[in-house]
Image (tube, helix red, strand yellow):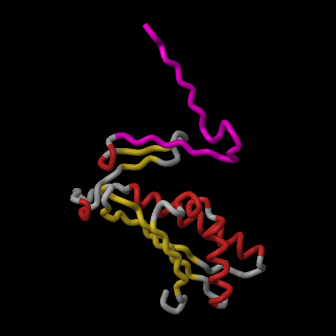
Amino acid sequence: MTTTSTTSSTPADDAAVYAATATAWGGREGHAASSDGRLDLHLSVPAAMGGDDGPGTNPEQMLATGWAACFHQALKGAARARKADVSESAVTVTVGLERSDAGFDLAARIEAEVPGVDPATAQDLLAAAHAACPYSRATRGNIRQEVVLVDSAEG
């Protein structure tokens, strides 16, 4: 009898400053939780995908939420470096599924509202944030991404 032993390493084992671990059971109609118990979610399939549109969240919402928070932090960092005030800014990320030859692909639209900052400076800040944000970098070249400056008057 041959016994195979595998050793897995996590990013925290190497150079990571922080690593999060989560487990999902039951796929899109199941449950997901983080290893520390801070995140504990029911999952539901949206009606647009043929699901029951139950009360749970879905992977696209979770990705959009994480990306929006991360991108906003990168925007704040870019603004701090340029001494720009983005205290009233907001970032909205929409993550969608698109049909492709391979099945489904993700696409993302990042919208930022940066009131009180002139449009040229705001565009520069968005470009710097998009270059720095780990979510943007991890998905660059893998999914369609669009970064849009939203006019704060449009809200």
The quarter of the image holding the N terminus is top left
Residue lying at 48% horizontally and 60% vertically, measured from the top left: 142
Q: Image height check: is 18 above or below 68?
A: above
Q: Residue at (61%, 86%) from the top-left corner?
A: 115
Residue 95 placement: quadrant: bottom left
Closer to the camera, 15 or 70? 15
Question: Residue 43: x, y in percent?
Answer: 34, 51
* Relative to 72, residue 18 above or below: above
Magenta segment: does it hold 94? Answer: no
Q: Residue at x 56, y 60 (%)?
A: 135
Residue lying farthest top? 1
**Rendered location of residue 104, percent (x, y):** 33, 58
| Residue 23 in magenta stretch | yes
Question: What is the quadrant of residue 48 in the picture?
Answer: bottom left
Prevailing secondary structure of the magenta residues:
loop
Q: Position of residue 107 (x, y in %)?
A: 42, 66
Q: Which residues are magenta?
A: 1-25
Q: Nearer the viewer, residue 104 or 54?
A: 104
44 relative position to 108: left or right: left
Residue drawn 53% across the image and 76% down it: 147
Q: Nearest the camera: 47 or 36?
A: 47
Labels in figure, total: 0
Q: Is residue 97 above or below residue 80?
A: above
> Residue 9, image x and y in percent?
60, 33
